[in-house]
Amino acid sequence: MKAVRQTFWKKIGDFVSNNMVPVLFVVICAFSIPLSGYSANYLLSEIIVRISRDSFLIVSLLIPIMAGMGLNFGMTLGAMAAEIGLICISDWGIVGIPGMVLAAIISTPISVLLGWWCGKILNMAKGREMVTSYIIGFFMNGIYQLVVLYCMGAIIPVRSAKLVLPRGYGIRNTVNLSGIRKSLDNLVSLKIAGISIPIATFAVIVVLCLFVVWFRKTKLGQDMRAVGQDMEVARAAGIKVEETRIISIIISTVLAGYGMIIYLQNMGTLNTYNSHTQVGMFSIAALLVGGASVAKANIRNVFLGVILFHLMFIVSPMAGKNLIGEAQLGEYFRVFVSYGVITLSLVLYEVRKKREANREGQELAADQKEDAR
Amino acid sequence: MRKIKEFINNFGLPRIIIGLFLLLLFVVAPFVGVKVSTSINDTIVRFGMNSVMVLAMVPMIHSGCGLNFGLPLGIIAGLLGATMSLEAEVHGFAGFMMAIVFATPFALILGWGYGRLLNKVKGGEMMIATYVGFSSVAFMCMMWLLLPFKNPTMVWGYSGRGLRTTISTEGYYLHVLDSFLEIKLGPIVIPTGMLLFFAVLAFGMWAFLHTKTGTAMTAVGSNPVFARASGINIDNIRTLSVIMSTWLGAVGILVYQQSFGFIQLYMGPFYMALPAVSAILIGGASVNKATIPNVIIGTLLFQGILTMTPSVMNSAVHTDMSEVVRIVVSNGMILYALTRKTEATR
Amino acid sequence: MNEQQTPLLEMRNISKDFFGNQVLHDISFTLGKGEILGLVGENGAGKSTLMKILFGMDEIRETGGYGGEVLIDGDVVHFSSSLDALNLGIGMVHQEFSLLPDFTAAENILLNREPVKSSFLTNLFGDRLDTIDRPKLEEISEKAIKRLGVPLDENMLVSQMPVGHKQFTEIARELSKEDSESAGQIRLLVLDEPTAVLSEKEADTLLVAMKKLAKEGISIIFISHRLQEIIDVCDQIMVMRDGRIIKQVPNDESVNISEIAQWMVGREVSIDSGSGRTYDYSNARISLSIRNLWVDMPGEIVRDVNLDVYRGEILGIGGLAGQGKLGIPNGVMGLYNGGGTVEFEGKRLPLNNPRKLLDAGLAFVSEDRRGVGLLLDESLEWNISFTAMQVEDKYLTRKLGFIKWRDEGAIKAETKKYVDKLAIKCTSTKQKAKELSGGNQQKVCLAKAFAVAPKLLFVAEPTRGIDIGAKALVLQALKEYNQQQGTTIVMISSELEELRSICDRIAIVTDGKVHGILPASSPRADFGLLMVGQGKKVANA
Amino acid sequence: MKRKCLVVRLIAIVLVIALAVLMFLIGRQHTILVDDKTIMLADGTEIKALSTVEVRIDKQEQMELAARDRDQYVVTGQRHTITVAYTDSQWDEHTFSREFEVPIGLDMVIISIPTLVARQDAPVGEWLSEYETPKVVVKQEEEVVTSEDTGLGSSF
């Protein structure tokens, strides 16, 4: 009886240590939800909105993880491509679903090009892909500004006065996306108990998830998993390692672009110079909150992550206000938690990697002890 | 011809491009009506303001911890020192020294913890350093709201609690270093005190690298296995280097503030690491090699570009593209360093 | 086994040199269908080079090709890549596993040769978007495993497998190649030390599987150091030494292990073994005593080493590659994780702490010059002085009474001394270590160790990868150092002759344990027996 | 195999471009001004405004325009139907519909209802023309915020 109880506690302990981040988040949410005083109905509807808004973006991170390239901080590149597409359709006055489709079509070649470039660079920085892709994001932000703030309206024709800065070139800080605002969300939408559910958006996300599941079963998917486990073994077997890695980044960038379009159609406005810098950080944090690690992530992590991360995000300002009368504190808290989660996950990953490497020695030591007996 | 190629290889193409670009800016400047003397003056002042933070990169690069993207942690120690010095109402040079004194224990403790953490994650230091910096800044955002500071110049007037986002150092230690032994050469004002202060710290760093421990630190960065085989405790040396980097970061931000005139709290330190990182790389450092000349040349080049581009661009094409130039130059330089084959072996 | 008109494989007068260094001389042999050929030889005997030629490796072509002819089915073949060899049905299982831990056996067996079905995106994005035909994948790998006749679950993850199953997976991979379009019917299998990592039981299963394959008509070249296995399973035995075939005999009752071992290491050739060294063991005092040492070093696992080293002697440690001889100094000096007890001059020393061992007066010249031995990016001065400076506070001056300042003058003088003494070829003492040749780098490593003036010096593979002239110089330097300073030296080397020329005693390590210790003047054959795990004789003189 | 692949890829690219064009056409938003003003045609004939007229484009809300009224419809796509109900001088009520296409590339067009009523079978060009918004010059500088945002207070 005692033994049974012991294994039970051990199992719980293992579960907690293996899922430290999600468990931590469940605890934070459990404390702050009652503190915030939000109704279940409100929270539910908010969460549904955010699942529909963000999941696509987060799913785009899965494929580079599969190929062993870690968290693709370069997903902002796709977001930038999407923003350029959206600026174009806003200028041309294309609205609704056709507008979204057209923006996606425009973003695709840009994403492919950027993804290819990013993949090339990451192949030159093997072993530190993450920090490199992170800097690539910053670097590309500079180029993006060059294009959008200085070339658009000057070299690249932009007709609409609503988009261009009064000085005659460059795009304004915010672009109103009223033309495509919620056009996908409202295409087919269902209302249950006062909560509206954007069926069409969910359908798109489900299709994407099915694609990812299917993709794992293709030759390319198999190659990516092989490359992710051991580049040298994969190379010895004749798999084109570098090409495979580049393709994984291209796919991720293109999907991130589409995700960004879905994200922005829900938001309704585009912060020309800021939107993309935020999504990378938030998507990665959400994925990690869902229990993913740098080396392993699946679709379950995506949805669990969106739910937990955004619950915390929604309730923390209110909880902060009710707890110490300072909403600002809650806002800082959630920023802290987002960064903290990424830090914690990265540290846990590195520590575990080290521990794995030491395991052989421990086994030898155990052998010795047995021999000694 | 081969010599030129060798030179380019040794010095690095991006550095040469950046150097030539800066030269071009200085040549073009008089023609588009920019006063070169003001530009030089600005460059010198900004050099003084930033050089200590760039110097803070040196110990960690030497010990093989890579580029210190976690500089914000040191800056936070400096900010704590600054606010406490203001709270204690110490004015003038004494206030500045007091800030350093207050900042030191924080720098030591934070640096020690940060160093211990980095020892646990060898090989993945840079990414984790970045996020340690970010999370500590976010954490301090909460602290700035909560810490019981009372000095009315620092605290939000209407609520009576929580620190302001920017606090003026005027009346405390504004320009205490800048104006010390200030030399005026026509339109150029040289902030001798600030440069001297940097010189003292740089000399200290140079001297440290010539001691037994300093030699060990260089060896740890050059080949950690060799150092370990020679009986060096790698973890201790690395921790020491991180503590030094953190402390220099703390002092660096104080020097910055006394010249700039404001203490920037909350998200202020957030992206402070990137300019310092790219400056030392522009100066010729790599991910695991850096010298004092790298610091000086790099800071001069980088700050030179930062001061020259807006003024020249504005006068020449009536567009301020300096922001784009800054982003592309600094991040491009970091990318270059990260992707160099010879440096990727570590 | 059975008479064949044309043998499956014939090698005629094969020779090969690497830039003037002759590694294979006039190798000729034949191998019939369904025969198992046991290939035996010390490290560096030329076995792997021969196999590389057979397999058409790029390395051979890039270094100027080979002399002689390779015939398959009586026809001369010229492989322009190992793919050609594959097409003719030659498969090779390497010593190191090339497996992916998170894939199943089946996925590993058919890695990059997975059977596919075209999908709706294939035409748009190319073949790589074919979907993998799982049932077929499992079917093919199951077939290969069945042929091997071993209990291997094709759906088991490699990371959860015992090591033997990993070896079976590797062999099954070679067998399965005939089911993909690119390779021909598998006819010849080369197994390079497949049993080295296996337990006895696993090895037995493998031998049974080999016999089964041979019965089906597949010829096998079996490389192993375990002579009993060779005798158990092979039809023919071929012994190589120094790039020549020493012996090729059919395996019948008359062949025994000690005979093979003797062929392997050769007969007494030189008499300079021991070379006049007279170490008097009667009054010898133990300097270093190692008990139950285990070391976790990749590729060189030490399991249980017990060894005594006497003060002032030169002790050699030999043995075949991968048996653990290199693990001993690396473990004692704390470079790799280890356990057990180490006593030096009567005091127990902690493991995994290089500093404590250096302080006690031990020093180590690592076999990994570039990785461990040198600061490649720093000057000779730094390389030679660093360890002594850190451990013994040499070359330092005091500034302000407490600052330990580097004394560049002293460092330069000391470096100059060693440069002259060891004849290190360099442009200046400021030259970077990476710019030196291998032999000179080795001398720098020695100088580094001499500079700390150790009481006991470990030297691992001091002559690896350096030319003959430098070799003699290095060995001479060690010998002189031992004589002049009375330093105890423990030298680890794969070259038995080298050990015999300067050591007093030689310990042979097999399977992570000291298998026996003999005086250096003992006949070669005795060492040969110890190396292959036979004969047991511990001589403490 | 290779060739088939190439063909499929070409077809795919063509299809995507076709889809893009289609999206461009059906998703294009236009503003259609409906105008009930007296108009002077090029040939010198004057067409008087209708005193009151009911207009409706596609299935949007019906609008009633008095003389000299002007109102606007925002529509998506190129092909539209306009339905006009008016009362003629005999107090007879007439309703008729006309299908028309907005010329490609125009943001804003104006339909002269009186012309349309007077010449119901005339080609589109006679009663529908491009409308150019008068440029109002309002110089108002806008500060561009390009700082790398930290994610604070964003509504992600």
Image (tube, coloured by chain):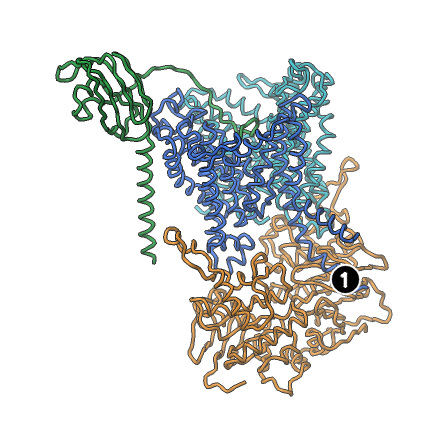
Q: Which residue is mark 1?
A: A368
Query: Which chain is in orange here?
Result: C
Between A331 and C249, the one lying in front of the other is A331
**In the rendered image, the vertical position of residue D56 relative to residue D90, given as above or below:** below
The x and y percentages for residue C100 are 57, 58
Residue B24: image quadrant is top left
Query: Which chain is in cyan here?
Result: B
A218 sits to left or right of D37:
right
Between A101 and A254, the one lying in front of the other is A101
The x and y percentages for residue C29 are 52, 81
- Amino acid bearing label 1: Gln
Query: Which chain is in blue here?
Result: A
The x and y percentages for residue C306 are 79, 66
The x and y percentages for residue A15 are 68, 47
Chain D display color? green
- Tally of marks: 1
Between C341 and C150, the one lying in front of the other is C150
Between C35 and D9, the one lying in front of the other is D9
